[in-house]
Image: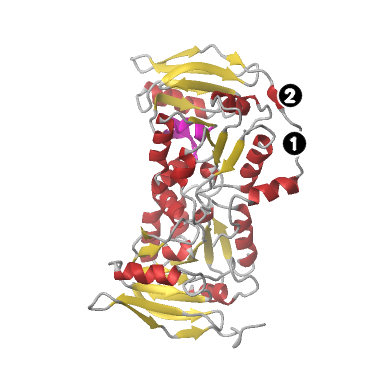
């Protein structure tokens, strides 16, 4: 048994796929595992298992500092034979971005939704950005490129709602606040460079890989109006203090 | 589209009866890879038609998939993981759209997963080893593909039909196609001389009957090409980019 509690790190936008050259967040994730050479498995499902995304993962998580692997659910005839056993043996499962709706459909078709819940309870750290962040929550506001923003029921490991690229793409903040006002569970909006670290189902801290990283908590007050509260962000050591020109 | 001869692809266009049909390609089963999208455009842009691609992984904010599909003359579904494709279609409501499209006379076509999906079931390698997988059930019976190309599929298909896990149906070679009008098998056509379609049914005592169906060889339509099939990689990729954002996040 691992000695880790259930943990999820949900990025508002960041990591190797969005912040090439800025390894702070990815380094932080590896350190969280507490292992010298952690096992890290990439799930690129939301991108349709795009080859270039898989290649970028292996470049970012090179074998010198971890044991990287990936699972393709579009090419099951090649690669990992037993996804459940493989995922349960990981220290970190890293979920890539893309289409949240397609991700959830594909996972459910292969039972990966249940395996990830099991892995989470067993102490495998779950993380990801964009669709790879939204998926862990009860509900989410869908990504930019899936038609107009709408509420989507996700895996529900965390009983909150989530929105990503919160401060960075027009319309996201409004759509999220409107949905919470309309009865979606209260939750977290995270901007690019901000990552929400949950231990169990509670937010432990927000970490930032950029100086302008921002995250908020959004709930509805007694009158049903949206209340937005800025969350303190701990800047990761090495993060620049000012935005480079 | 995976094969060299374009006769089957061309045949899909002629089935629409339109001089310049709208044809939409869905590469869902392979996760909408850029190479498939490029190959589709390279082939279909050489012909008088209006080709588009619908990516469910990179939907534009203003794209309503159902609306786009229902204004086509033909819908062409690519190969890959049948299980993933159907799961993703269900999440996006595309399964119902396909039934509606079929009912209003849009030609539905496809290869591999894109061929088997229309039936009650097929034999898919979505889970690794070949196994029976349920389809949309627009067409009665079952279909197994790559009869000549993947030898491990046929035994699984025979066994599934014999013990009733799959209804009777056909196994088809690469280059062979079944043409249904409504739910009636109108004919089998082929783009290569040796392509076969074999009817496989349970014999009622745990075994199967097999019978090869007559097949019509399609003319080689390469002469219809307007000579744009040799598009350079760069141009084709540029065109493919039109279909969606490149960003994955």
Check disc 2 and report the residue beneath it: B223
Q: Earlier in the sequence, mark 2 or mark 1?
A: 2
Give yes or no for contact between labels 2 and 1 (Cβ–Cβ under 8 Å). no
Badge 1 crowding class, 10 Å Cα cut-off, few under 14, some 14 to 19, many 20 or more, is few
Could you say which is closer to the camera, residue B145 or residue B210? B145
Could you say which is closer to the camera, residue B132 or residue B100? B100
Image mark 1: chain: B
Q: Residue at x 65, y 73 (%)?
A: A21
Q: Which mark is residue B87?
A: none
Give the residue at the far front of this rendering.
B19
Give the residue at the far bottom of this rendering.
A241
Coordinates of residue B134 in the picture (x, y in percent)? 39, 34
Coordinates of residue A25 in the picture (x, y in percent)? 55, 75
Coordinates of residue A17 in the picture (x, y in percent)? 59, 65
Check disc 1 and report the residue beneath it: B228
Badge 2 crowding class, 10 Å Cα cut-off, few under 14, some 14 to 19, many 20 or more, is few
Q: Is residue B122 visible?
A: yes
What is the secondary structure assignment of the residue under circle 1?
loop
Coordinates of residue B201 in the picture (x, y in percent)? 41, 17
Is residue B121 part of the magenta span, yes or no?
yes
Q: Which residues are magenta?
A: B112-133
Could you say which is closer to the camera, residue B242 or residue A189? B242
Q: Residue at x 61, y 25 (%)?
A: B8
User: What number of labels is visible?
Assistant: 2
What is the secondary structure assignment of the residue under circle 2?
helix
Same chain check for tags 2 and 1: yes
Give the residue at the far left of this rendering.
A222
Q: Is residue A160 visible?
A: no
Q: Residue at x 44, y 30 (%)?
A: B122
Quarter of the image for residue A67 reads: bottom right
């Amino acid at each position: 048994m691992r000695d880790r509690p259930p943990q999820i790190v949900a990025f508002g936008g960041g990591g190797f796929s969005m912040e090439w050259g800025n390894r702070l967040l990815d380094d932080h994730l590896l350190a969280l595992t507490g292992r010298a050479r952690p096992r890290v498995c990439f799930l690129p499902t939301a991108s349709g298992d795009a080859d270039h995304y898989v290649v970028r993962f292996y470049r970012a998580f090179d074998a010198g500092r971890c044991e990287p692997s990936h699972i393709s659910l579009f090419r099951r005839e090649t690669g990992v034979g037993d996804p459940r056993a493989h995922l349960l043996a990981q220290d970190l499962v890293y979920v890539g971005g893309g289409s949240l709706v397609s991700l959830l459909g594909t996972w459910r078709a292969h039972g990966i939704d249940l395996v990830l819940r099991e892995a989470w309870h067993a102490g495998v750290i779950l993380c990801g950005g964009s669709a790879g962040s939204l998926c862990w929550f009860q509900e989410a506001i869908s990504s930019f490129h899936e038609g107009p923003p709408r509420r989507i029921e996700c895996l529900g490991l965390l009983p909150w709602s989530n929105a990503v690229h919160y401060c960075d793409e027009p319309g996201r903040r409004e759509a999220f606040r409107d949905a919470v006002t309309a009865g979606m569970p209260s939750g977290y909006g995270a901007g690019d460079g901000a990552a929400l670290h949950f231990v169990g189902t509670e937010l432990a801290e927000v970490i930032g890989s950029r100086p302008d990283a921002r995250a908020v908590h959004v709930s509805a007050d007694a009158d049903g109006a949206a209340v937005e509260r800025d969350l303190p962000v701990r800047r990761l050591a090495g993060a620049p203090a000012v935005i480079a020109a | 589209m995976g094969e060299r001869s374009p006769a089957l692809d061309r045949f899909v266009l002629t089935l629409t009866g339109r001089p310049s049909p709208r044809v939409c390609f869905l590469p869902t089963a392979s996760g909408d890879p850029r190479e498939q999208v490029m190959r589709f455009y390279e082939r279909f842009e050489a012909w008088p038609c209006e080709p588009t691609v619908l990516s469910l992984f990179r939907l534009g904010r203003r794209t309503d998939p159902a609306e786009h599909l229902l204004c086509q003359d033909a819908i062409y579904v690519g190969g890959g993981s049948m299980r993933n494709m159907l799961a993703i279609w269900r999440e996006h409501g595309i399964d119902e759209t396909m039934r509606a499209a079929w009912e209003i006379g849009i030609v539905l076509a496809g290869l591999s997963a894109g061929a088997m999906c229309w039936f009650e079931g097929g034999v898919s390698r979505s889970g690794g080893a070949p196994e029976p997988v349920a389809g949309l059930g627009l067409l009665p019976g079952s279909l197994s593909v790559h009869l000549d190309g993947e030898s491990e599929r046929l035994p699984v298909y025979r066994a599934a039909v014999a013990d009733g896990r799959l209804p009777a149906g056909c196994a088809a070679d690469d280059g062979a196609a079944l043409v249904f009008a409504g739910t009636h098998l109108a004919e089998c056509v082929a783009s290569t001389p040796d392509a076969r379609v074999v009817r496989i049914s349970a014999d009622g005592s745990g075994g199967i009957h097999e019978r090869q169906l007559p097949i019509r060889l399609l003319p080689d339509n390469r002469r219809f090409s307007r000579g744009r099939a040799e598009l350079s990689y760069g141009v084709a990729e540029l065109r493919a980019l039109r279909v969606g954002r490149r960003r994955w996040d």
